[in-house]
């Protein structure tokens, strides 16, 4: 086929835009790695980092071979010969893969500090191969009406994955954390909670800001084919609502924290900013400017409340607060769709469609996640031993220390005597 | 209106370019957060991070509702009904907002370690609502001749905000720091200075490199509408002068440090690199290749000298050196315009116009900033108590510790005994 | 010349794409800085960071004035009057410069912890001025057939610098590390090795993920002129093979580590991911989808083996494993070209051409690097004194401490007594 010259330029623009936003979304893995690393104990940091690296590495490979095929069941794909020889099709694949891996990586924050590496990797494999692709097959990749529209007669609205990616990841995390049980010492016998603070607020906030940077790709980039029809109106609305909701999320969480304790907890501000981003992700293209304020402030304000409920009432140890940040905020934003829309939306049918979508995606995610973690638990492979948990997963699972010079391991930071610093031959780095 | 097909593609290119550079400029907040966090004591890190998150969150909201309207006084905008229903207009708004928030966030580095959170947020609110927008109304957003041109007959040249954004932010920071007074123990009774080193050079350098990355968006991205007329010459010049001035800034600061002490202070190299970026920001589009060397090396070399003057002579505690990096380097680059231009520029009228612009922007910034901080100080709301300053702002203002496992708070890094690590129920994380 | 309207838009697209990927590649310096900082002792972190900042600053300046001229010897350039007044030419220059600086910065990881700053900077100067430019003149910038084609009759294939940038950098690093000798205490008299662990796994992994982000610009961005002819097929293939090879690199290294020790060493996973990226960099545009799996897993799997060989057999102290990551992985991927190609390639002549290219580039790099470091060593300027090495290069070369509040320098993290924290007047920060 000979392309007309203008079409060449237009196609090139479309594909370079998709690539750039895919790179930004990929970079969110650095954000998740830092956000989670900062929120865990120093003895578990390398474990968290390794999970992050392997989530991407194993997940994207599985999504190439299996997941992307299931995701586009309705329209062929993945397994097909056409896919394996495609070129531009691989741009679309990468674009799909970075969204898939975002859903996958959220779970690791919930099960931090006690899940076995092999358990987590087994779950990640199945999430990338089946759980997430089934959600996509039911929603984004349907060539006909999606499952929600078949059931309710109204289409399900989720622009960039507020429910499909973040809600799904947050719910999966909560489910896994519930089955896995809390870290040792997290809850007392009377059900009261102890705080196990993360080891570095600096890394947590760095992760937050890297995520926000990547999120612009996530949300604005979902206006993918920008050169064929002029999508400037949509691009501008998405950029504005994403910005305002992120800002109001931080403000909402800060306000609730301040009202309750008189102080502005840094981690609530950071997680509130992320919750504001999650909240708007389903609906950035349709929300009115004032709606972005509403979605943001509610997404942020619910964070401390839901965190409290999960901790105090459910006694679930969701280490990095992934449910309040990704789960409940994603559900909230998805359900708010008809109430904050810029244009005229028939509220009742739209709300029902959104609710049905949330229930289907949530139900499938809980069911599949629970099944896998119950099996892992029943064969004694879900959780490290109490000794290993006490010692820290870095040493027990990876044979490394994250900060060998700091802390109280008999290793001094003094440069005066090198022999005190070095491990003898035979350490893991020596194989 | 039906757009011609080529215009669709061209508009799409223009807007995606503006969006991508806006994302890069937003990411500079991660850079500022790390740069400043690295330069403060570990007991004040979370405070610095929180200020950074809230500067963006509160600032961008205020700039949406108030600031952008004032900024474009001359040509309508902000408050108007048109703005509230726009689409592509919101792309331009985000583009303006990320510049505004850069100016705002600079101040937090100067007042670190002793400003009350509510004082800082009050100032940030007013900076985003009024102080910066007035500067914009006098310069970039004028539809007719700007204020400087009205006065001198010659236009004020500031391509990407060397004076308007960075100079303004650096001067505001110095003014606020002067009124607030130094941290306890920073200066002795005889006027001599003590160094209070930052807690992590690694975070400071990470922040520096993130800022440099975002700065390419800041400077090169200011060639905004690239598809309608071929701006390749300008794009290339801006990319080259920005790169060379950044490099020479690091070299200039390193050289002065080395000449004075025989050693190359890492922080001077990092801040010199940033000063080189600031120095060229007003004039990257007009400066000759050799001019970029001149601007860079002078911007870097002035850093240790001006830092010294601020510390030793003025006894102002500008914690993160924001005046030498953003203030004096911004002024210097702005004034160098006619002397380093690639083309022929009438030196005297151009220099007068630049000088008048610097005086107007600097004068307005000092006046407005001083008024606000004097009021805050007079009502006892500017500064935390000596007890809180001693204890650190993380605990007193935020109820958190940035590194709970490190240091000497009776919390050991040993994983052996979880109960030693956890805060009892009722800590801030529990609300 | 009056450009036709479509050509204006197409040129603008091409140049903005080149600029965006150049920014991404520049950002790899933040990745290298963090990766290397994390892998060195805390007493040498600021030294490593300074080297990184100065590599860019000095290197890019030298490459502007000297290196780019030599690099394009065959076709004019660099020194020429045309270059000094160009605009779009400077976009191409920046694009070349960010590749050059990647090669330069790799070396600092190999010689960490004992090379004198002035020795390292001398080498960097010569690398940017001559060593790398000569490689470019022999390969990418030849207007006629490159040197390999002249010799073998078959062109040398290196798409994005698997050999030209990474292989060259890794080989240079190994050569310099061999001549410089190991850090004190690194090897015992019987030739057995001691591990000197890096000070922060978190920074190392952050650096890894920043590098992977930038690498998308490095590889995908090498499809540079995307608007004139439709390069979608190539863009998609490069994006896919880069992703898969990166993922399989992490998996391959993790698998070998796990087979040998039963544990998954975090640093091997991170470095394996990078080795997967290096491995594909020469050939992302021609490799079949299954070939990306092969290249990735082999690049990752060779990492622990080659690291072991360098450490145990050669007793070379390659601190940040730059040879296994950049050197051997780059050579491997370059040589694999004909065996994993998607299309039909005549294996024997193609392999010979690749081998000859590897030998020429490797031979030149070793010769030039060895000559410089032998001279530096012979005049006693290569290495710091044993006292300075013991004390740490941060203090001896830079007069700073990276983490003044942590460790055992008599400086306590307690906020209670500021006077204990502050250095007296006259410290390096005071000049």
Image: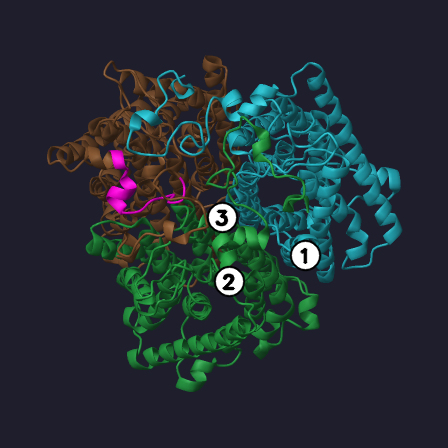
Chain colours: A cyan, B green, C brown
Q: Is residue C394 magenta?
A: yes
Mark 1: which secondary structure?
Answer: helix
Q: Are marks 1 and 3 on the same chain?
A: no
Say the numbered circle drawn on residue B69: none
Q: Which quarter shows the C terminus of chain A?
A: top left
Query: Residue A183 appears in which quarter of the rendering?
Result: top right
The residue singled out by tag 2 in the image is B115
Where residue A33 appears, as percent x and y from the top left, is 54, 37
The residue singled out by tag 1 in the image is A255
Where residue B430 appears, as percent x and y from the top left, is 68, 43
Q: CA distance from mark 3 to mark 2?
A: 52 Å
Looking at this view, is B303 or A417 the one in front? A417
Q: How many marks?
A: 3
The residue singled out by tag 3 in the image is C227
Q: CA distance from mark 2 to mark 1?
A: 20 Å
Judge whether residue A78 can be spotted in this image. Answer: no
Please determine whether, in this image, residue C367 is positioned above or below residue B34.
above
Where residue C414 appears, as percent x and y from the top left, is 45, 46
Q: Are marks 2 and 1 on the same chain?
A: no
Q: CA distance from mark 1 to mark 3?
A: 49 Å
Please determine whether, in this image, residue B430 is positioned above or below residue B154.
above
Q: Are marks 3 and 2 on the same chain?
A: no
Region in magenta: C390-406
Q: Which quarter shows the N terminus of chain A?
A: top right
């Amino acid at each position: 086929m000979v392309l007309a010259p203008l079409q060449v330029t237009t196609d090139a623009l479309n594909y370079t835009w998709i690539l750039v936003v895919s790179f930004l979304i990929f970079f969110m893995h650095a954000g998740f790695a830092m956000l989670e690393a900062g929120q865990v104990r120093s003895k578990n940091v390398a474990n968290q980092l390794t999970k992050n690296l392997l989530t991407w590495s194993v997940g994207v490979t599985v999504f190439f071979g299996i997941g992307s095929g299931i995701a586009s069941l309705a329209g062929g794909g993945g397994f097909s010969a056409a896919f394996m020889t495609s070129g531009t099709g691989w741009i679309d694949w990468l674009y799909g893969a970075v969204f898939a891996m975002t859903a996958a990586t959220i779970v690791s924050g919930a099960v931090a500090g006690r899940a076995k590496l092999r358990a987590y990797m087994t779950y990640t494999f199945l999430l990338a191969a089946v759980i997430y692709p089934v959600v996509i097959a039911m929603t984004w990749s349907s060539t006909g009406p999606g499952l929600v529209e078949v059931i309710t007669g109204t289409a399900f609205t989720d622009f960039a994955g507020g429910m499909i990616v973040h809600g799904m990841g947050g719910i999966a995390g909560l489910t896994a954390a519930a089955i896995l049980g809390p870290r040792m010492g997290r809850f007392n016998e009377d059900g009261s909670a102890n705080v196990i603070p993360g080891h570095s607020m600096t890394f947590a906030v760095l992760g937050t800001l890297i995520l926000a940077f990547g999120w612009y790709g996530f949300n604005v980039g979902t206006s993918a084919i920008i050169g064929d029809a002029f999508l400037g109106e949509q691009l501008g609305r998405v950029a504005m609502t994403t910005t305002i909701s992120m800002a109001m999320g931080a403000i909402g969480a800060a306000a609730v924290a301040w009202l309750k304790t008189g102080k502005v907890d840094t981690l609530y501000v950071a997680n509130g900013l992320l919750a504001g981003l999650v909240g708007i992700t389903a609906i950035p293209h349709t929300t009115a400017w004032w709606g972005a304020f509403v979605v943001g402030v509610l997404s942020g304000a619910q964070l401390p409340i839901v965190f409290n409920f999960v901790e105090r009432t459910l006694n679930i140890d969701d280490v990095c607060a992934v449910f309040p940040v990704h789960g409940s905020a994603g559900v909230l934003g998805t359900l708010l769709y008809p109430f904050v829309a810029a244009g005229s939306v028939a509220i009742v049918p739209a709300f029902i469609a959104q609710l049905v979508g949330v229930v289907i995606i949530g139900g499938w995610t809980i069911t599949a996640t629970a099944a896998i973690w119950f099996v892992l638990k029943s064969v004694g492979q879900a959780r490290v031993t109490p000794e290993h948990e006490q010692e820290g997963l870095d040493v027990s699972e990876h044979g490394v220390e994250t900060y060998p010079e700091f802390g109280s391991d008999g290793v001094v930071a003094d440069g005066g005597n090198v022999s005190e610093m070095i491990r003898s031959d035979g350490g893991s780095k020596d194989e």
